[in-house]
Image (cartoon, rainbow, N blue to C red):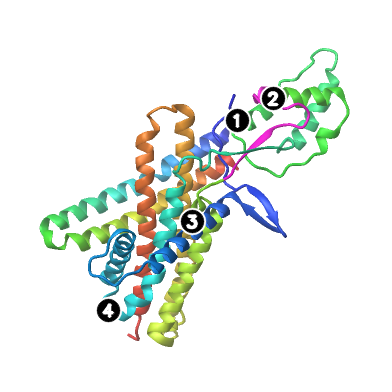
Protein backbone atom coordinates (compact mmCIF):
# COMPACT_ATOMS: atom_id res chain seq x y z
CA UNK A 1 0.00 0.00 0.00
CA UNK A 2 2.79 2.38 0.86
CA UNK A 3 4.62 1.59 -2.36
CA UNK A 4 2.01 3.40 -4.44
CA UNK A 5 2.21 6.43 -2.20
CA UNK A 6 6.00 6.34 -2.30
CA UNK A 7 6.08 6.16 -6.09
CA UNK A 8 3.62 9.03 -6.43
CA UNK A 9 5.51 11.22 -3.95
CA UNK A 10 8.86 10.44 -5.58
CA UNK A 11 7.87 11.75 -8.98
CA UNK A 12 5.53 14.44 -7.70
CA UNK A 13 8.02 16.16 -5.45
CA UNK A 14 10.91 15.37 -7.76
CA UNK A 15 9.36 17.28 -10.64
CA UNK A 16 8.97 20.58 -8.76
CA UNK A 17 12.61 21.65 -8.94
CA UNK A 18 13.24 20.84 -12.60
CA UNK A 19 9.95 22.45 -13.55
CA UNK A 20 10.96 25.73 -11.99
CA UNK A 21 14.48 25.38 -13.37
CA UNK A 22 13.37 24.82 -16.95
CA UNK A 23 10.94 27.72 -16.70
CA UNK A 24 13.70 30.07 -15.56
CA UNK A 25 16.07 28.83 -18.25
CA UNK A 26 13.58 29.33 -21.03
CA UNK A 27 12.62 32.77 -19.73
CA UNK A 28 16.21 33.96 -19.74
CA UNK A 29 16.83 32.34 -23.11
CA UNK A 30 13.89 34.06 -24.73
CA UNK A 31 14.90 37.34 -23.19
CA UNK A 32 18.40 36.95 -24.58
CA UNK A 33 17.03 36.18 -28.05
CA UNK A 34 14.83 39.23 -27.80
CA UNK A 35 17.77 41.45 -27.01
CA UNK A 36 20.02 39.98 -29.71
CA UNK A 37 18.08 38.24 -32.47
CA UNK A 38 21.23 37.62 -34.52
CA UNK A 39 22.65 35.23 -31.93
CA UNK A 40 19.42 33.24 -31.78
CA UNK A 41 21.09 30.05 -33.07
CA UNK A 42 23.80 29.92 -30.42
CA UNK A 43 21.43 30.95 -27.65
CA UNK A 44 18.94 28.28 -28.66
CA UNK A 45 21.59 25.57 -28.76
CA UNK A 46 22.87 26.38 -25.29
CA UNK A 47 19.34 26.73 -23.98
CA UNK A 48 18.39 23.24 -25.17
CA UNK A 49 21.56 21.92 -23.53
CA UNK A 50 20.69 23.54 -20.21
CA UNK A 51 17.12 22.27 -20.41
CA UNK A 52 18.37 18.71 -20.98
CA UNK A 53 20.51 18.91 -17.85
CA UNK A 54 17.61 20.22 -15.76
CA UNK A 55 15.19 17.66 -17.16
CA UNK A 56 17.62 14.83 -16.37
CA UNK A 57 17.03 15.45 -12.66
CA UNK A 58 13.29 14.98 -13.17
CA UNK A 59 14.03 11.80 -15.09
CA UNK A 60 16.09 10.47 -12.17
CA UNK A 61 13.05 10.98 -9.93
CA UNK A 62 10.86 9.22 -12.51
CA UNK A 63 13.22 6.24 -12.67
CA UNK A 64 13.12 5.98 -8.87
CA UNK A 65 9.32 6.03 -8.96
CA UNK A 66 9.23 3.33 -11.64
CA UNK A 67 11.65 1.16 -9.72
CA UNK A 68 9.54 1.52 -6.58
CA UNK A 69 6.40 0.59 -8.45
CA UNK A 70 7.61 -2.24 -10.64
CA UNK A 71 10.51 -3.89 -8.82
CA UNK B 1 -8.86 -10.65 -20.69
CA UNK B 2 -5.62 -8.75 -20.24
CA UNK B 3 -4.25 -8.47 -16.78
CA UNK B 4 -2.82 -5.00 -17.23
CA UNK B 5 -0.29 -3.12 -19.34
CA UNK B 6 2.89 -5.07 -19.80
CA UNK B 7 5.75 -3.26 -18.11
CA UNK B 8 9.12 -4.74 -17.39
CA UNK B 9 12.25 -2.87 -16.40
CA UNK B 10 14.56 -5.75 -17.30
CA UNK B 11 14.70 -6.76 -20.91
CA UNK B 12 13.39 -10.27 -21.33
CA UNK B 13 15.71 -12.98 -22.60
CA UNK B 14 14.57 -14.56 -25.83
CA UNK B 15 17.17 -17.29 -26.12
CA UNK B 16 20.73 -18.05 -25.07
CA UNK B 17 23.67 -18.58 -27.39
CA UNK B 18 26.49 -20.33 -25.59
CA UNK B 19 25.89 -18.61 -22.27
CA UNK B 20 25.13 -15.16 -23.70
CA UNK B 21 21.53 -14.11 -23.17
CA UNK B 22 20.03 -12.55 -26.25
CA UNK B 23 17.39 -10.14 -24.98
CA UNK B 24 14.71 -8.48 -27.07
CA UNK B 25 16.35 -5.07 -26.73
CA UNK B 26 19.66 -6.55 -27.89
CA UNK B 27 17.86 -7.95 -30.91
CA UNK B 28 16.45 -4.53 -31.75
CA UNK B 29 19.86 -2.89 -31.37
CA UNK B 30 21.34 -5.48 -33.72
CA UNK B 31 18.59 -4.79 -36.28
CA UNK B 32 19.29 -1.04 -36.06
CA UNK B 33 23.04 -1.56 -36.40
CA UNK B 34 22.55 -3.87 -39.36
CA UNK B 35 20.30 -1.38 -41.13
CA UNK B 36 22.74 1.50 -40.56
CA UNK B 37 25.61 -0.56 -41.97
CA UNK B 38 23.47 -1.65 -44.91
CA UNK B 39 22.48 1.94 -45.66
CA UNK B 40 26.10 3.09 -45.52
CA UNK B 41 27.24 0.30 -47.83
CA UNK B 42 24.49 0.96 -50.38
CA UNK B 43 25.26 4.68 -50.45
CA UNK B 44 28.98 3.99 -50.81
CA UNK B 45 28.48 1.63 -53.72
CA UNK B 46 26.20 4.04 -55.54
CA UNK B 47 28.33 7.11 -54.93
CA UNK B 48 28.71 9.42 -57.93
CA UNK B 49 30.89 12.55 -57.83
CA UNK B 50 28.44 15.25 -58.82
CA UNK B 51 27.45 18.64 -57.54
CA UNK B 52 23.76 17.80 -57.86
CA UNK B 53 23.18 14.59 -55.93
CA UNK B 54 19.82 12.92 -56.17
CA UNK B 55 17.91 10.28 -54.30
CA UNK B 56 19.66 8.25 -51.64
CA UNK B 57 22.95 10.09 -52.05
CA UNK B 58 21.17 13.39 -51.50
CA UNK B 59 19.61 12.09 -48.32
CA UNK B 60 22.91 10.74 -47.01
CA UNK B 61 24.71 13.98 -47.85
CA UNK B 62 22.04 15.96 -46.04
CA UNK B 63 22.52 13.90 -42.87
CA UNK B 64 26.30 14.11 -43.01
CA UNK B 65 26.31 17.81 -43.78
CA UNK B 66 23.91 18.76 -40.97
CA UNK B 67 25.82 16.75 -38.40
CA UNK B 68 29.18 18.05 -39.61
CA UNK B 69 27.94 21.65 -39.41
CA UNK B 70 26.75 20.99 -35.88
CA UNK B 71 30.14 19.55 -34.96
CA UNK B 72 32.00 22.42 -36.61
CA UNK B 73 29.88 25.07 -34.95
CA UNK B 74 30.88 23.77 -31.52
CA UNK B 75 34.41 22.56 -32.18
CA UNK B 76 35.64 25.56 -34.13
CA UNK B 77 38.43 24.21 -36.27
CA UNK B 78 38.57 21.58 -38.95
CA UNK B 79 41.10 19.24 -37.36
CA UNK B 80 39.05 18.79 -34.21
CA UNK B 81 35.80 18.52 -36.14
CA UNK B 82 37.14 15.72 -38.29
CA UNK B 83 38.08 13.77 -35.18
CA UNK B 84 34.88 14.42 -33.25
CA UNK B 85 32.49 13.94 -36.14
CA UNK B 86 32.38 10.11 -36.37
CA UNK B 87 31.55 9.70 -32.69
CA UNK B 88 28.99 12.47 -32.53
CA UNK B 89 27.26 11.40 -35.73
CA UNK B 90 27.22 7.72 -34.77
CA UNK B 91 25.81 8.44 -31.34
CA UNK B 92 23.11 10.60 -32.89
CA UNK B 93 22.09 8.19 -35.66
CA UNK B 94 22.24 5.07 -33.49
CA UNK B 95 20.26 6.60 -30.63
CA UNK B 96 17.61 8.25 -32.78
CA UNK B 97 16.96 5.07 -34.75
CA UNK B 98 16.78 3.00 -31.56
CA UNK B 99 14.37 5.47 -29.98
CA UNK B 100 12.13 5.71 -33.03
CA UNK B 101 12.08 1.97 -33.61
CA UNK B 102 10.17 1.70 -30.35
CA UNK B 103 7.27 3.54 -31.97
CA UNK B 104 6.91 1.26 -34.97
CA UNK B 105 3.87 -1.00 -34.96
CA UNK B 106 4.70 -4.42 -33.65
CA UNK B 107 7.58 -3.44 -31.40
CA UNK B 108 6.89 -4.22 -27.74
CA UNK B 109 3.42 -5.48 -28.66
CA UNK B 110 4.06 -8.63 -30.70
CA UNK B 111 5.48 -11.38 -28.58
CA UNK B 112 5.22 -14.87 -27.22
CA UNK B 113 3.45 -16.13 -24.17
CA UNK B 114 5.72 -18.18 -22.00
CA UNK B 115 4.65 -20.54 -19.26
CA UNK B 116 6.19 -19.31 -16.07
CA UNK B 117 5.93 -20.75 -12.58
CA UNK B 118 4.15 -18.64 -9.99
CA UNK B 119 6.36 -15.65 -9.43
CA UNK B 120 7.57 -13.99 -6.27
CA UNK B 121 5.06 -15.68 -3.98
CA UNK B 122 7.11 -18.60 -2.67
CA UNK B 123 6.92 -17.57 0.96
CA UNK B 124 3.43 -16.16 0.82
CA UNK B 125 1.96 -19.25 -0.77
CA UNK B 126 3.47 -21.49 1.85
CA UNK B 127 1.94 -19.37 4.59
CA UNK B 128 -1.41 -19.43 2.81
CA UNK B 129 -1.25 -23.20 2.60
CA UNK B 130 -0.95 -23.45 6.36
CA UNK B 131 -3.90 -21.14 6.80
CA UNK B 132 -5.97 -23.09 4.31
CA UNK B 133 -5.15 -26.31 6.10
CA UNK B 134 -6.43 -24.90 9.36
CA UNK B 135 -9.76 -23.80 7.97
CA UNK B 136 -10.01 -26.63 5.51
CA UNK B 137 -13.54 -27.67 6.36
CA UNK B 138 -14.97 -24.18 6.32
CA UNK B 139 -13.79 -22.46 3.20
CA UNK B 140 -12.66 -23.97 -0.06
CA UNK B 141 -10.64 -21.10 -1.35
CA UNK B 142 -8.92 -18.42 0.60
CA UNK B 143 -8.84 -14.86 -0.63
CA UNK B 144 -5.18 -14.24 -1.32
CA UNK B 145 -5.30 -10.52 -1.28
CA UNK B 146 -1.59 -10.11 -1.14
CA UNK B 147 -0.95 -12.24 -4.17
CA UNK B 148 -3.76 -10.62 -6.14
CA UNK B 149 -2.17 -7.30 -5.56
CA UNK B 150 1.05 -8.39 -7.18
CA UNK B 151 -0.24 -9.88 -10.38
CA UNK B 152 -1.89 -7.02 -12.32
CA UNK B 153 1.44 -5.82 -13.62
CA UNK B 154 3.43 -8.81 -14.67
CA UNK B 155 7.01 -8.29 -13.60
CA UNK B 156 9.73 -10.77 -14.34
CA UNK B 157 11.06 -12.22 -11.12
CA UNK B 158 13.27 -15.05 -10.05
CA UNK B 159 10.77 -17.88 -10.15
CA UNK B 160 10.97 -21.17 -8.35
CA UNK B 161 9.01 -24.28 -9.11
CA UNK B 162 8.83 -25.62 -5.59
CA UNK B 163 5.33 -24.83 -4.57
CA UNK B 164 3.69 -26.01 -7.75
CA UNK B 165 4.79 -29.61 -7.27
CA UNK B 166 3.10 -30.13 -3.93
CA UNK B 167 0.42 -32.72 -4.21
CA UNK B 168 -2.10 -31.40 -1.72
CA UNK B 169 -5.49 -30.47 -3.16
CA UNK B 170 -5.62 -27.28 -1.12
CA UNK B 171 -2.44 -26.03 -2.74
CA UNK B 172 -3.87 -26.83 -6.13
CA UNK B 173 -6.94 -24.80 -5.24
CA UNK B 174 -4.75 -22.01 -3.96
CA UNK B 175 -2.79 -21.84 -7.15
CA UNK B 176 -5.81 -22.02 -9.43
CA UNK B 177 -7.67 -19.41 -7.43
CA UNK B 178 -4.65 -17.16 -7.78
CA UNK B 179 -4.58 -17.80 -11.48
CA UNK B 180 -8.31 -17.30 -11.82
CA UNK B 181 -8.25 -14.06 -9.89
CA UNK B 182 -5.52 -12.80 -12.17
CA UNK B 183 -7.74 -13.46 -15.11
CA UNK B 184 -5.56 -16.05 -16.84
CA UNK B 185 -6.72 -19.42 -18.01
CA UNK B 186 -3.71 -21.44 -16.89
CA UNK B 187 -4.31 -24.53 -14.93
CA UNK B 188 -1.58 -26.06 -12.86
CA UNK B 189 1.63 -24.21 -13.50
CA UNK B 190 0.67 -20.62 -12.69
CA UNK B 191 0.74 -17.52 -14.85
CA UNK B 192 1.70 -17.11 -18.46
CA UNK B 193 4.18 -14.35 -19.04
CA UNK B 194 4.14 -12.12 -22.08
CA UNK B 195 7.55 -11.67 -23.69
CA UNK B 196 7.67 -9.09 -26.51
CA UNK B 197 9.91 -10.01 -29.42
CA UNK B 198 11.25 -6.52 -29.98
CA UNK B 199 11.83 -3.64 -27.63
CA UNK B 200 13.61 -0.31 -28.19
CA UNK B 201 17.30 -0.82 -27.54
CA UNK B 202 17.73 2.34 -25.52
CA UNK B 203 14.96 1.38 -23.11
CA UNK B 204 17.42 -1.13 -21.65
CA UNK B 205 19.74 0.30 -19.01
CA UNK B 206 22.55 -1.91 -20.33
CA UNK B 207 22.58 -0.22 -23.74
CA UNK B 208 22.49 3.30 -22.34
CA UNK B 209 25.14 2.48 -19.77
CA UNK B 210 27.37 1.14 -22.53
CA UNK B 211 26.85 4.29 -24.61
CA UNK B 212 27.58 6.46 -21.57
CA UNK B 213 30.80 4.57 -20.80
CA UNK B 214 31.99 4.86 -24.39
CA UNK B 215 31.21 8.57 -24.40
CA UNK B 216 33.03 9.37 -21.17
CA UNK B 217 36.06 7.24 -22.01
CA UNK B 218 36.31 8.90 -25.40
CA UNK B 219 36.25 12.28 -23.65
CA UNK B 220 39.31 11.24 -21.64
CA UNK B 221 41.00 9.97 -24.80
CA UNK B 222 40.28 13.22 -26.65
CA UNK B 223 41.64 15.19 -23.73
CA UNK B 224 44.87 13.20 -23.68
CA UNK B 225 45.26 13.39 -27.45
CA UNK B 226 44.62 17.11 -27.96
CA UNK B 227 45.87 18.58 -24.72
CA UNK B 228 48.61 16.06 -24.05
CA UNK B 229 49.60 15.00 -20.58
CA UNK B 230 48.55 18.44 -19.31
CA UNK B 231 45.05 16.99 -19.36
CA UNK B 232 45.93 14.94 -16.29
CA UNK B 233 46.53 18.12 -14.29
CA UNK B 234 42.79 18.53 -14.42
CA UNK B 235 42.44 15.64 -12.01
CA UNK B 236 45.76 15.51 -10.20
CA UNK B 237 46.73 19.05 -9.36
CA UNK B 238 49.38 19.27 -6.65
CA UNK B 239 50.04 23.01 -6.70
CA UNK B 240 47.99 23.68 -3.59
CA UNK B 241 45.60 21.67 -1.38
CA UNK B 242 42.52 23.44 -2.68
CA UNK B 243 43.29 22.53 -6.29
CA UNK B 244 43.96 18.95 -5.18
CA UNK B 245 40.45 18.81 -3.75
CA UNK B 246 39.07 20.32 -6.94
CA UNK B 247 40.83 17.56 -8.87
CA UNK B 248 39.11 14.92 -6.78
CA UNK B 249 35.78 16.64 -7.42
CA UNK B 250 36.51 16.50 -11.14
CA UNK B 251 36.98 12.74 -10.95
CA UNK B 252 33.66 12.39 -9.13
CA UNK B 253 32.09 14.65 -11.73
CA UNK B 254 33.25 12.33 -14.52
CA UNK B 255 31.63 9.37 -12.77
CA UNK B 256 28.47 11.41 -12.30
CA UNK B 257 28.48 12.10 -16.03
CA UNK B 258 28.40 8.38 -16.78
CA UNK B 259 25.37 7.91 -14.50
CA UNK B 260 23.73 11.04 -15.82
CA UNK B 261 24.11 10.06 -19.49
CA UNK B 262 22.87 6.53 -18.86
CA UNK B 263 19.85 7.48 -16.78
CA UNK B 264 18.79 10.47 -18.86
CA UNK B 265 18.47 8.38 -21.99
CA UNK B 266 17.11 5.28 -20.25
CA UNK B 267 14.60 7.24 -18.19
CA UNK B 268 13.24 9.19 -21.13
CA UNK B 269 12.79 6.24 -23.46
CA UNK B 270 11.64 3.70 -20.86
CA UNK B 271 9.18 6.16 -19.30
CA UNK B 272 7.89 6.95 -22.77
CA UNK B 273 7.34 3.26 -23.39
CA UNK B 274 5.48 2.88 -20.07
CA UNK B 275 3.42 5.98 -20.87
CA UNK B 276 2.37 4.65 -24.25
CA UNK B 277 1.57 1.23 -22.80
CA UNK B 278 -0.59 2.70 -20.04
CA UNK B 279 -2.41 5.17 -22.31
CA UNK B 280 -3.08 2.49 -24.92
CA UNK B 281 -4.32 0.21 -22.17
CA UNK B 282 -6.73 2.85 -20.87
CA UNK B 283 -8.09 4.39 -24.09
CA UNK B 284 -6.90 2.56 -27.22
CA UNK B 285 -8.62 4.87 -29.75
CA UNK B 286 -7.32 8.31 -30.77
CA UNK B 287 -6.02 9.40 -27.36
CA UNK B 288 -2.54 7.85 -27.80
CA UNK B 289 -1.98 10.05 -30.88
CA UNK B 290 -0.64 13.20 -29.12
CA UNK B 291 1.51 10.99 -26.90
CA UNK B 292 2.99 9.35 -29.97
CA UNK B 293 3.81 12.81 -31.28
CA UNK B 294 5.49 13.65 -28.02
CA UNK B 295 7.47 10.43 -28.10
CA UNK B 296 8.73 11.17 -31.61
CA UNK B 297 9.86 14.58 -30.38
CA UNK B 298 11.43 13.17 -27.22
CA UNK B 299 13.29 10.52 -29.18
CA UNK B 300 14.80 13.17 -31.43
CA UNK B 301 15.67 15.51 -28.57
CA UNK B 302 17.33 12.82 -26.48
CA UNK B 303 19.51 11.74 -29.40
CA UNK B 304 20.42 15.35 -30.07
CA UNK B 305 21.18 16.01 -26.40
CA UNK B 306 23.38 12.93 -26.08
CA UNK B 307 25.33 13.82 -29.21
CA UNK B 308 25.67 17.49 -28.29
CA UNK B 309 26.69 16.85 -24.71
CA UNK B 310 29.34 14.43 -25.94
CA UNK B 311 30.51 17.06 -28.39
CA UNK B 312 30.63 19.78 -25.75
CA UNK B 313 32.59 17.55 -23.36
CA UNK B 314 34.99 16.63 -26.18
CA UNK B 315 35.51 20.31 -26.83
CA UNK B 316 36.05 21.17 -23.19
CA UNK B 317 38.54 18.34 -22.79
CA UNK B 318 40.44 19.29 -25.94
CA UNK B 319 40.73 22.88 -24.81
CA UNK B 320 42.27 22.11 -21.48
CA UNK B 321 45.75 23.62 -21.54
CA UNK B 322 48.11 24.58 -18.78
CA UNK B 323 46.82 27.68 -17.03
Magenta region's main secondary structure?
loop
Residue in the picture at 54% in, 57% down? B30
- CA separation in Å, label 2 and label 3: 37 Å
Q: Position of residue B94 (x, y in %)?
A: 44, 59
* Badge 4 and badge 3 in a common chain: yes
| N-term mark: 3 or 1 | 3
Q: Position of residue B302 (x, y in %)?
A: 38, 54
Of tags 2 and 1, the one toward the viewer is 2
For label 2, count other residues whose C-alpha is less than 10 Å away and answer few (under 14), some (14-19) or many (20+).
Answer: some
Q: Observer-nearest residue: B162 or B94?
A: B94
Q: Check disc 4 and report the residue beneath it.
A: B77
The numbered dot on residue B152 is 1
Callout 3 secondary element: helix
The numbered dot on residue B132 is none
Which chain's residue wears label 4? B
From the viewer's perspective, is residue A41 above or below residue A22?
Answer: below
| N-term mark: 2 or 1 | 1
> How many numbered marks, from 0 up?
4
- CA separation in Å, label 2 and label 1: 14 Å
- CA separation in Å, label 4 and label 2: 65 Å
B10 within the magenta span: no
* Badge 3 and badge 1 in a common chain: yes
Which chain's residue wears label 3? B
Range of residues picked out in magenta: B180-197
For label 4, count other residues whose C-alpha is less than 10 Å away and answer few (under 14), some (14-19) or many (20+).
Answer: few
The numbered dot on residue B32 is 3
* Badge 2 and badge 1 in a common chain: yes
Q: Are marks 4 and 3 in contact (CB under 8 Å)?
A: no
Callout 4 secondary element: loop
Q: Are marks 2 and 3 in contact (CB under 8 Å)?
A: no
Judge whether residue B261 can be spotted in this image: yes
Amino acid sequence: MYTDLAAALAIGLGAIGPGIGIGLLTAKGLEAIGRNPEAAGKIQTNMILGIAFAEAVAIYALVVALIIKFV
Amino acid sequence: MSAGPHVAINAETLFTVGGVHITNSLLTSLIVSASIILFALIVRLKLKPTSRPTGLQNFAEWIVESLYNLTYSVAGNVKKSRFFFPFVATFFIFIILNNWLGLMPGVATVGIKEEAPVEKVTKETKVEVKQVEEVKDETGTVEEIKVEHETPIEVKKEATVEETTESEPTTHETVTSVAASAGENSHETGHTKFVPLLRPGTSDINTTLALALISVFMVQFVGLRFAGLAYLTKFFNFSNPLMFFVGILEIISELAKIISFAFRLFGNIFAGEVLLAVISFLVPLLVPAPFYGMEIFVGFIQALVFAMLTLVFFNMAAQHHKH
